[in-house]
Image (spheres, rainbow, N blue to C red):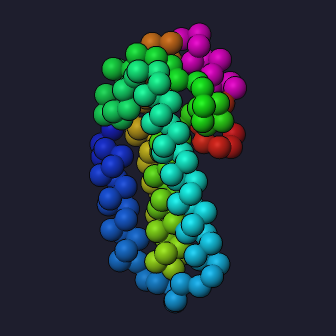
Amino acid sequence: MELKIPPPVLFALALLVIFFLPQSGQIGALEYVAVGLACLLGFVCAISSIYAFYRANTTVNPHDPNKTSTLVTTGIYRVTRNPMYMALLYFLVAFSFWQTSLLGLFVVLGVKIYLTRYQIMPEERILAAKFPKEYAQYQQRVPRWFWK
């Protein structure tokens, strides 16, 4: 596996980096709305993805995708293949706005790129090997993120 830094550790490191970035001022009404919306989206992604894995009786452990017993394509997995990672990104966006750090959004972009290359792409290769036909069809139907 190409995974270098587990997603929860990467998330914590990104929070620290954003915390120490320069802030652009006081948080205002617009930032509060952005924080609330990003947190809401993050919670929806996290809870619904974990619930879908629970219902399918398969692992949520990002460190060992080989233990996957079922290809989950229902619930939130009908609109994105990576809602757990989307949740992490939404929480980082919320924290960036809370810190009034627009530079924090570049950290979020870096985390997205890192996750895609070192976590998601290796997971996709494992899923394609375990569920060749089903996963190929799923990849054609559902975007990696919320967009193609």
Depth check, front residue: 35 or 86? 35
Identity of the residue drawn at 60% across and 31% down: 75
Q: In which quarter of the image is residue 38?
A: bottom right
Q: What are the residue bounds of the magenta stretch?
A: 132-141
Q: Position of residue 66 (x, y in %)?
A: 35, 20
Depth check, front residue: 98 or 145? 98
Q: Position of residue 113 (x, y in %)?
A: 49, 49
The correct choice, above or below, for 76 with respect to 124 in the image is below
Depth check, front residue: 22 or 53? 53
Work out which quarter of the rendered image holds the C terminus and state it: top right
Count the marks. Answer: 0
Furthest residue to the bottom? 25
Residue 20 seen: yes
Residue 91, magenta (yes or no): no
Furthest residue to the top? 133
Q: In this view, does 4 lie to the left or right of 124?
A: left
The correct choice, above or below, for 26 with respect to 34 in the image is below
Residue 135, magenta (yes or no): yes
Q: In this view, does 56 lie to the left or right of 73?
A: left
Q: Where is residue 110 in the image (x, y as percent from the top left)?
A: 47, 57
Residue 2 seen: no
Identity of the residue drawn at 53% across and 73% down: 97
Work out which quarter of the rendered image holds the N terminus and state it: top left
* Prevalent SS, magenta region: helix
Identity of the residue drawn at 37% across and 55% down: 11
Depth check, front residue: 121 or 44? 44
Q: Where is residue 146 in the image (x, y as percent from the top left)?
A: 65, 43
